[in-house]
Image (cartoon, rainbow, N blue to C red):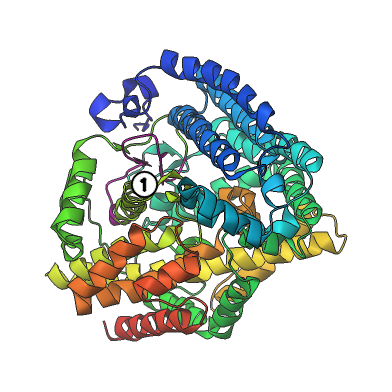
Amino acid sequence: MSTKTISTRDQVAVENTWRLEDIFESDQDVQAAIASSKQSLGIFKSYQNQVTSNANTLFEVLKKSDDVSMIVEKIYVYCHMRLHQDGGNSFYQDLASQSEKLMVDLETATSFISPEISTLTEAQLEAFLQENPELTLYKRVLHEVLRQKEHILDAKTEDLLSQFGEITTAPSNTFAMFNNADLKLPTIQNEDGEDVRITHGNYISLLESHNRSVRESAFTGMYTSYSNFKNTLATNFAASVTGYSLVSRIRNFRTPIACALNANNIPTEVYDNLITTVDHHLNLMHDYVALRKDIMGVDTLHMYDIFVPLVNDFKKEISFDEACSIILEALKPLGEDYVAQVKEAFDSRWVDKYENEGKRSGAYSWGCFAAPHPYVLMNYSNNVDNLFTLAHEMGHAMHSYLSSHTQPYPYANYCIFVAEVASTVNEALLMQYLLKTTTDPDFHKYLVNYFMEQFRGTLFRQTMFAEFEKSVYTLHSEGATLTSQVLCDTYYNLVKKYHGDAICVDDLIAMEWARIPHFYTPFYVYQYATGYSAAIALSEGILKEGPEAVKRYKAFLSGGSSQDPIDLLKMAGVDMSSPAPIESALKVFEGLIAEMKTL
C-alpha cells in the first residue's frame, strides 16, 4: 500500500512557482528596503499640526505619504507571499512580522493626517483645490475624508488606535499560523486504497469521491481535528469579534457592520437586503437538496454528500496547462487584448501552481501598485473545480492589472465590494463556453450540476456565512459570551435552516465556522454573494450584447476606486442597490434545477 506525499518547497520546480523577483530581486533587497523605510517615517513629524496650513503643504504631505506607502505595501506583500509559500519557514515568519510592524509604524506616523484634514470645511477645501492644481489628484480622497468626518478621531486617539492594530490583528495571525502550519490533519484511505493525509488543498477533492466511506472519513477527520481545539479556536475568534466591535464603537459607528461597510460607502441595507432576499428564496435551496437526495438514491443524505458530482462515475482530469488553454478560449468574448494579457500571465510565472508542505491553503490573487503585475496563488489539482478556481483568480488578477495600469496610486485599488465581480464573470464565461462546446452528455450534466453548486456554494453558502457573522456580532453586543457551544449552536441552526429537511445535518458540521479564514476579516463574505449576482447579470450582457457591454465592463475593470463601488457597477450596467440582481440570479438557479430534473 503506497502513501501519497506532499513536496517540500525546495522540491518544487521553479517553473511551477511565481516569480517574486519581479517585486524584489532578493531577500537582501527587501531587508534594505525595510531599513530605509523605517528611516523615512521620520519625515512626517515636521508636518504635524501643519497639514492644512496651506494648499502646498497639504499636497506635499499626501504625496510623501503615498510614496512611503507604496514601498511599505510592496514590502508587506512580498514578505507575506514568501511566507505563504511555506508557513513553517522561520526566516519568512520573521520578515513578515517585520513588515507587519512596519505597516503599523507607518499608520502611526501618518495617523495625524486624516484628523487634520477633517478640520477643513468644504469651502476651505475648494479654495485649496483652486490654489494648487496638483491637489486635484487627491480631490476624491479629500472629499472621502470629509464624508467620514464623524468617524475620524483626534490625533492622540488615532495614534493609539494605530498602535492597537498589532493587537486587533493578532487573532487572525494566530489562526493563520494554527491553520497553515501547526494543525495536523489525519491520514485516511482514498478510493484506491492508498493512504493520503487530509490537507486543506485536497479536502474538497476527497468530498467529491464517489466512495461514500472516503467522503465520510474526510469529513469526520477534518471536523474532529478542529473539534479537538474548539475552545481555543472559540476564544481566539471571540477575541477577534471583541477587538473589531471595540474599534467600531470607538469610531462612533452604530454597529460593526456599519463600520465595515462605511469605508466603501455601502449602505448597511445592502447587507440586510442580501440576507432577506436569499432567506425568502430558501425553498430553492431546499429543492436542490431534495433533488440531490433523489438523484443519489440514498435513504439519508449527509453533509458529506453535498460535494460529490451527481453524474455517476464521471471524472475528468484537467492538467494545469490544459486549464490555461481552455480559459484562454473561454475568455475570447472579452476581446483579444484581454486574452493576450491573460496568456502573458500564464507564460510569465504570475502563478504559484501546486500544493507543497506548509503552503497557505486555498487560492488568491494579490499584488501591489509598485510591482509590474499581480500574482495568483493556487494549490492546483487536476480537476474541473480547480479549472474554475484558476479562471476565478485570473479575473481578480486582471481587475488589479487594469486598475493599477489605468488609475494613479490613490485610486488603483478596487474595494472588496466589487472584488468578486471580475472573478465570477470569468467563471460564468467559462461555464457558458464549456456548456456550449462539450459533446459529452455526462460532462454536460456535470456542468449543470457544477453551475448549481456555484449557486449553492457562493450565493447561498456565503449568505449563510454572512448571517452567521451578523448573529455572532449581535450576540456579542447583547452581552453573550462567545463560547464554543454558543458558536457551534448558532452555526448548526443556520445550516439546518439553509439546507431544509431532506438532509441529515451531522453534528460535526457545527465546527465548520472554525475553519473559515474570512471570518477574521469581518463582514467580508457577503460580497461573494452580491458580487456573484452582479457577475451573472454582467456575463449575460457580455454574451448577448457583445462589444458595447464589453466596453462598459472594461471601464469598470479599469475604475479602481475612482468612484463609489455602487456607481462603478451602475456604469457597468448593474444596480446593486436593488434586490433585482439577486432575484435574477436565483431565477437562473431555479432554471438549472428544472433542467437537471429532465436530465
Asked whether 387 or 420 is in front, the reply is: 420
Asked whether 362 or 39 is in front, the reply is: 39
Mark 1 residue crowding within 10 angstroms, few (<14) / some (14–19) / many (20+)? many
Q: What residue lies at 31% left-to-right and 63% top-to-bottom?
A: 555
Provide residue 113's location: percent of width, then percent of height: 66, 41
Provide residue 50's location: percent of width, then percent of height: 69, 37
Please say if 293 is above or below 216. Answer: below
In the rendered view of the protein, which quadrant contains the N terminus?
top left
Q: What residue lies at 77% left-to-right and 65% top-to-bottom?
A: 254
Residue 125 in the magenta stretch? The answer is no
In the rendered view of the protein, which quadrant contains the C terminus?
bottom left
Provide the secondary structure element on which disc 1 rests.
helix
Residue that label 1 marks: 404
Residue 366 in the magenta stretch? The answer is yes
Q: What residue lies at 56% left-to-right and 27% top-to-bottom?
A: 99
Provide residue 224's location: percent of width, then percent of height: 62, 47
Q: Quarter of the image holding residue 380?
A: top left
User: On the picture, is 51 further left or further right than 593?
Assistant: right
Q: Main secondary structure of the magenta part?
A: loop
Provide residue 68's location: percent of width, then percent of height: 52, 31
Q: Which residues are magenta?
A: 361-387
Q: Residue furthest front?
A: 131
Please say if 90 is above or below 176. Answer: above
Residue 507 visible in the snapshot: no
